[in-house]
């Protein structure tokens, strides 16, 4: 019987997963299910669908695609709005890595 993964890692594409798998320790890689999307909007949609259906942690990895702090803040607010009604909304965190 397959072990249950502790979380889903959703990215904008396969290349993001390749980078993460090179950077993360094997223990984390083995305990996460990686899902590649086809861009920003697709990743948001998949993350919300999984969050509503599953009782698993969702780690959403997105590119800011901008150097503007204002645009980055807008994207963070949009992500917060999209996940506002998800089961884990009290536990969610949105952060920006520069």
Image: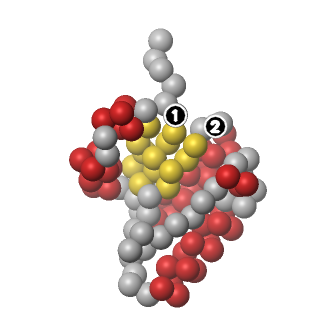
- Colouring scheme, one of rainbow, by chain, secondary structure, one colour: secondary structure
Image location of residue 75, percent across then percent down: 55, 75
Q: Residues within 10 Å of mark 2 (few under 14, many from 20)?
A: few
Q: Residue furthest top?
A: 1
Residue at the (46%, 50%) spot, across then down: 10
User: Which residue corresponds to mark 1?
Assistant: 6
Comparing labels 1 and 2, the label whose residue is closer to the camera: 1
* Side of 14 where 94 appears, left or right: right
Q: Is residue 38 visible?
A: no
Question: Residue at (44%, 37%) from the top-left corner?
Answer: 33
> In whole angstroms, how far apart are the C-alphas of marks 1 and 2?
11 Å
Question: Residue 17: x and y, percent?
Answer: 32, 49
Front one among 26 and 13 = 26
Per the image, label 2 sits on a secondary structure element best described as loop
**What percent of the width, then of the height, locates residue 6?**
52, 34
The residue at the point 54 percent across, 59 percent down is: 44
Question: Which residue does the numbered mark 2 point to in the structure image?
Answer: 54
Q: Earlier in the sequence, mark 1 or mark 2?
A: 1
Give the image quarter of residue 26: top left
């Amino acid at each position: 019987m397959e072990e249950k993964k502790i979380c889903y890692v959703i990215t904008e594409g396969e290349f993001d997963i390749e980078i993460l798998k090179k950077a993360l320790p094997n223990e984390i890689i083995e305990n996460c299910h990686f899902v590649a999307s086809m861009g920003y909007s697709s990743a948001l949609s998949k993350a919300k669908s999984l969050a509503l259906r599953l009782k698993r942690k969702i780690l959403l990895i997105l590119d800011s695609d901008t150097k503007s702090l204002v645009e980055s803040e807008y994207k963070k607010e949009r992500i917060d709005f999209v996940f506002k009604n998800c089961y884990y909304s009290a536990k969610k965190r949105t952060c920006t890595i520069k």
